[in-house]
Amino acid sequence: MANADTEAFTLLALGLLFIIVRVYVRWSQVGSPLNFAVDDYLMPLAGLVFTGETVAAHLVRSQFDGLTNSYMTDEQRAAVHPTSREYYNRVWGSKIQVIGWSLYAMILWLIKFCVAIYYSRLTTGLNHLPTRVRFAYILLGVTYLTVALTIILGCQPMRKNWQIYPNPGNICQPTNSTLSVLVVVIPNVITDLYLMSIPLPLLWAVKIPTRQKITLLGLFSSAAFIIMAGIIRAVTIMTSGPNGAVSGSQWACRETFVSIIVSNLPIIQPLIRRGAGMVGLSGLFSSRGQNSSYKFRGESVPLGSRVTQTGTGTEMGKKSRTRTRVSVSMHDRGTGHGGWGSDEEGLVGGKAGDIKVTQETIIEREVVSKGGGERNAEGFEWEDGGKRMNNMR
């Protein structure tokens, strides 16, 4: 059990370190905690809940010998005297298990809300993606209420959660309650899969180098590790026998740790990218020298592009082939505080400020000539890192 405690507190320390780094990066981006988004406050709260979860797991292992009211035959239940130390350990171990389940669900859904809020900033104005994020809020709210209420109210009266004799039934054995296991793992997997699907359209739409796209695909698909950890925890609880309380607590801490790491990776990616550049791996993140564009309604439209016509006029109503010079800019949405840049900049791998890429293309269009003059070509400008397109007349 000493090794389990060492692992749990090591994961806690690393998880809190990641949260601190995230706060530092966001502080650098927005200039002041007063400018933090909601998820910047929720993530430290998740760190506090992670601390409580780890302490609860430690108490079950070290103070109550990993004992609960589960994994006992009727004969064993009848043999445990209410004044014995074993009875005391089993009662309090079961109470801590109820608390542990509640903290476990709370931290997972806090992290999910952080991810959804981050995606809301990332997808503002991009086709139907904001609608999908708003649905994620509803999905997360409904599933969390379902999970939390099931953990608290699934066994009635609540004192049966730590009843030793007579047998309170599986539903009132918090360590291995089938109801608790399923009502947590199924919504947990469903919500993670849904959140993981939100940024994928961005990866297919944005024109970036293939290796950078693979890097981002791996970044957003890393939630699969959370899903795997959740499933392993559920299976472990149902199959571990008398060690289920300890094993389940261990996997809860592991899953929480992985959730914190995965959810904060996109935020701290600018810092990771800087470190990668120092060791010669900046190519995994940088798109310098490449044409950055976004497919809009089936067409490829450069990010931050302004189109100006350089050809000559023709007669009214005739088509002409004009040579167009396109200046591509990726705008930094940071506040100018010398930080790491915006969320969008962190994903596409540009540096803070404008990145201009020039290309030439041939566009067929109708131009109208009046008195030897010619109407200017229509220009399009993507603002806020590719979030809105304004028609400039």
Image (spheres, rainbow, N blue to C red):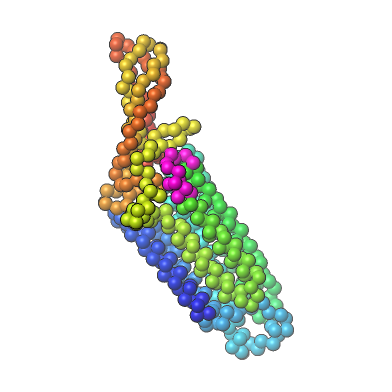
Residue lying farthest to the right in this orientation:
75
56 shown above or below 20: below
Q: Residue at x 55, y 68 (%)?
A: 251
Q: Position of residue 300 (x, y in %)?
A: 44, 33
Q: Residue at x 42, y 64 (%)?
A: 45
Q: Residue at x 61, y 89 (%)?
A: 84
Residue 246, quarter of picture: bottom right
Count of marks placed on residues: 0
Main SS of residues in magenta: helix
Q: Is residue 155 visible?
A: no
Residue 125, quarter of picture: top left
116 shown above or below 231: above
Nearer to us in this view, 296 or 169? 296
Q: Is residue 191 visible?
A: yes
Q: Position of residue 343 (x, y in %)?
A: 38, 49
Q: Residue at x 33, y 15 (%)?
A: 313
Quarter that holds the C terminus: top left
Residue lying farthest to the front in this orientation:
280
The magenta segment? 204-217
